[in-house]
Amino acid sequence: MRSGVHVVTLFSDVAGSMRETHVGADNRAAGRTAGLLLARMAQPPRDTLLLSSQATRLSAEIERRIGFAQVIEERFPKLRLLRTPDLPADDAGAARALQRFLKKDVDIARIAGLYNVGSGSAGIVRALDAVGIGESVSVVSHDFTEKHRTLLNNGGFAYVLHQDIHYCVLAAARVLRALCENVRGALNVVQPRVEILTAENLH
């Protein structure tokens, strides 16, 4: 920016930067959406919701965590929110770390749902299956990949929260081109909404 290069952040913003605009979904709203979905599915005696993530500096994932915790605290005070330790980003590492945590530090009979804000979601499903609660715990994840499509269809995920990646990339490119051409109103961009995907609405 200081040298005259136009900068647009994509998907995850950079707090305190000089960027001209950000293109991406409202991640705090996405976290709140995940909280509402999981909390409404929780039934006694399953009153615990797990929040899992990696050690991250990405504002998108931090905002998702904040939104999730906010909505549980504000609207579902009878539910218990429990953070897992920071998980590795890869599926195999996430599976091992979460399985250790579930076996040692939590009453698995009380877990109603799990929200994963970042990567490693397939490993998380594997860990839940390994301790025998995969079918009874609802999982919400982000980003619609082929692997996630399979997990939605076979019941590993209850929901996938997704933003239109193609739209975001094209919108960012349009903004940058307009900035380079000094087009008035170049920064006016419609931000993508968070889509709630289930096995039933994929087609």
Image: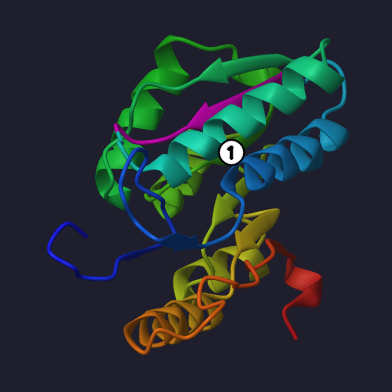
Image coordinates of residue 70 in percent, x first then y, are 69, 23
Left or right: 93, with 12 as reference point: left
State the extent of the magenta-drawn residues as a range.
Answer: 47-55
Q: Is residue 136 visible?
A: no
Q: Which residue is mark 1?
A: 115
Q: Residues within 10 Å of mark 1 (few under 14, many from 20)?
A: many
Quadrant including the N terminus: bottom left
Residue 172 in which image quadrant: bottom left
Q: Amino acid at mark 1?
A: Tyr
Label 1 SS:
strand
Residue 142 in which image quadrant: bottom right
Q: Is residue 99 visible?
A: yes
Work out whether residue 77 or residue 98 is closer to the camera in this orientation and state it. 77
Left or right: 2, with 103 as reference point: left
Instruction: Write the residue at 39% across / 48% down.
Output: 123
16 lies above or below 69: below
Image coordinates of residue 9 in percent, x first then y, are 37, 61
67 lies above or below 101: below
Instruction: Write the residue at 81% across / 72% down.
Output: 200
Left or right: 118, with 202 as reference point: left
Instruction: Write the residue at 48% across / 72% down.
Output: 145
165 lies above or below 21: below
Quadrant including the C terminus: bottom right
Image coordinates of residue 125 in percent, x first then y, are 50, 47
Left or right: 114, with 63 as reference point: right
